[in-house]
Amino acid sequence: MSFTVTPEHEELRQTVRRFLAEKSPIAAVRKTMTTDAGFDDAVWAQMAEQIGLQGLIVPEAHGGAGMGAAELAIVAEEMGRVLFCAPFLSTVLATQALLLAGSEAARNDLLPGIAAGTTRATLAYVEPGGDWEPSAAKATATQEGADWRLDGEKAFVLDGHTADVLLVTARTADGLSLFRVDAGAPGLERKALPTLDLTRKLANVSLNGARATRVGTAGDVTPAIERAVQWAIAALAAEQAGGAQRCLETATDYAKTRLQFGRPIGTFQAIKHRCADMLVSTEFAKSAAYGAAAALVDGDGVVEATAIAKSYCSEAFFQAAGDNIQIHGGMGFTWEADAHLYFKRAKSSSLLFGDPVKYREKLAARIGL
Amino acid sequence: MTEEELRGRVRALVAKVDPDRVDMHTFRGAQFDHGLALVNFPEGHGGLGLNPRMQGVVNDELQKSCKTTYDDLVVNPIGIGMGMPTLLTYGSDEMKKQLLRRCYTGEDIWCQLFSEPGAGSDVAGLAMRAERQGDAWVVNGQKVWTSLAHVSRWGMLLARCNPDVPKHEGLVYFLVDMQSPGVEVRPLYQITGEAEFNEVFFNDVRIPHANVLGKVGQGWHVAITTLMNERTALGGGSSQRASGPIRILMGLWQERGKGRGEAGAVSRDRITKLYIEAELLRATAARGRAAQRSGNPGPEGSVGKLAQAELYKRIWECCTDVMGADALTYEAGYELRRPRTEDRRDAVGMAKYQFLRSRANSIEGGTSEVMRNILGERVLGLPGEPRVDKAVAWKDIPR
């Protein structure tokens, strides 16, 4: 239920860590998160040129690195550690949506640009009300000659306000399909949301006869979109594990140096034991995230493993982020300390794609409970 | 030695001494003489000087070649798991010759005599007194939580030889013959009704000086060797998906819990959470073993004991809740008895027993509080608590 970490994985981790240390120190995160776009164009371009992460899971035939879920987990874990502000998770979603539900023409058309970092794409599949099941989509698609017109509302779209291309799910006569709507398309309206978590941007999208191209394969694409979301969940879980690890490290570092009652607060068992419990749940979270990645690599037990990862990593990261605030005391409640950035990221990650209870419900049904 | 050569050696042993035809002591004696008892031990002492991983090859080949196999943890858990490594490191050649083989065969059962009523987590603060008299020592005091003392021939005994120095510096470590005059073993009545453990009283027990392991005053170092071999045995979770305690809980739920409708939703979520943690305990232990194999051990290997103890308590408690009113009865009863497996042959009996027994999981082999201190200090590098007893002579520490 895990993958074996190879020396190549370790090398990848170090490469990503070095890049992020240089390009995404916490000062840069704080600056970027207050911009409307929520990411730094220059850093995005450098990431594509220097380490090619946009194309990590894009097949080599389409100009990517052709890596799998294990490598994705390692990269996402590093990004989660530093709250990297970039449209990476939306890229993962869009890439998988195209690979799993897209026609060959659409893959040929879009994936090279995505891999090169020149096309930023996202997947719009959730609608107002926040039911995270792809099957709940109500937006409709009507054919008009070679083009299509989309009507409906999409909500909580990752990087929806900045993406060059929106991949949108909508209903046709033969079921749910996938459509491409370009940024400037007539009938498309996008509205950035004021997010709880400033480090991850979301938008609502209105489609009023929006001009679209059908990119979905023939027939219903619901299962394919579900699998694409499972890829995103696996990446998100690794991010969460990385975030929890960082909270553990900052809390522990603070407990070593903060003096009260004439001694480091880390000498008190009330603090030390909280840190030890964080260590346990962080290690479990890593196991859960790697387990989800391994299931995607094997193509076996994906629903169960991603449900475990979504449930456990969400709660472990949130607990760690809360504990980190508590251990920092009054300082932890300030804007100046970074603890709140992780706390908000933890909650937004926990709710994104559905909360832990929802995934335990799915898991329970699968394991016969 | 290659894996294939080792397998050949096992087959040669079985061809010569067939475990399906001879008794346990005879077979295990032959296994010891062939160097296949603990392959990491030196030749002549039951091993072949190989990497300890190779023991897995031996056990695997034995499983394949014969119907009768023995589990060290059943034959002589404390003797083999903790006693033999300690004896190998600190014993004289004569003691090794005399004791290692009989320990491995199970002819001599061993027990560990460390904990005392006044020394639990703070075991180095123990009070059992050892006084030198010529070629022997005279020992007085009480030990507690001693598994197997009632059937043991040898005990690993930690006692105080010098109360005038700080606690860690005044200890001596003995191998004591449990049949010596003055040793009295009494069953310890536990919350389950069973006596897995004993209290052991020492009244003017004479131990030959030759039975001291390590140097007088350095018994703590020897004890560390014993204890290090204890914790590694705990905390690996179950080996297979959805096995062990969680399997029993899920089975009970499938029989009794389903169909509770809305009222069951909370329990269902609770069980699912426990299932997730059981799976992650297993996965984390596997990750720890993989990291160990690659020579890169990280924190994943050290969280198991704490995590397992706390998880198993919750799983067994959940079992009683799923059983509902049926858990109001305890068929095994509470008359003092030694452990008997028939009380827990089915899931219901097992769950009722383990509901009580699992409370010890977070106490034995290091309490969860001690484990959190260890994780905090050794893994996370947090500073230790100020020690009020550090530079103080043992006799001056409040107790």
Image (cartoon, rainbow, N blue to C red):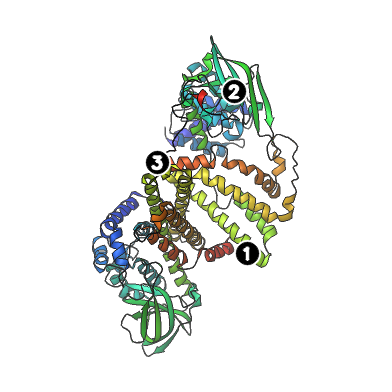
- Residue under circle 2? B154
Of all chains, the one bearing label 2 is: B
Q: Quadrant of residue B151?
A: top right
Marks 3/2 same chain:
no
- Foreground mark, 3 or 1, reads 3
On the rendered structure, is A24 left or right of B263? left
Percent from the top left, x then y, of residue B320?
A: 68, 52
Location of residue A141 with respect to A130 vertically, above or below: below
Percent from the top left, x then y, of residue A111?
A: 32, 71
- Residue under circle 1? B265
Q: Relative to the observer, which residue lies in front, B46 or A153? A: A153
Regarding residue A213, the answer to whether it shows in the image is: yes
Gap between marks 3 and 2, in whole Å?
A: 48 Å
Amino acid identity at mark 1: Ala
Q: Which mark is residue A99?
A: none
Label 1 secondary element: helix
Q: Residues within 10 Å of mark 1 (few under 14, many from 20)?
A: some
Q: Residues within 10 Å of mark 3 (few under 14, many from 20)?
A: few
Residue at position x 24%, y 64% in the image: A46
Amino acid identity at mark 3: Gly
Amino acid identity at mark 2: Trp
Gap between marks 1 and 2, in whole Å?
A: 53 Å
- Residue under circle 3? A262
Badges 3 and 2: C-beta atoms under 8 Å apart?
A: no
Of all chains, the one bearing label 3 is: A
Badges 3 and 1: C-beta atoms under 8 Å apart?
A: no
Residue at position x 43%, y 28% in the image: B49
- Foreground mark, 3 or 2, reads 3
Where is the C terminus of chain A found, in terms of image quarters? bottom right
Percent from the top left, x then y, of residue A152?
A: 44, 84
Label 2 secondary element: strand
Location of residue A255 with respect to B84 vertically, above or below: below
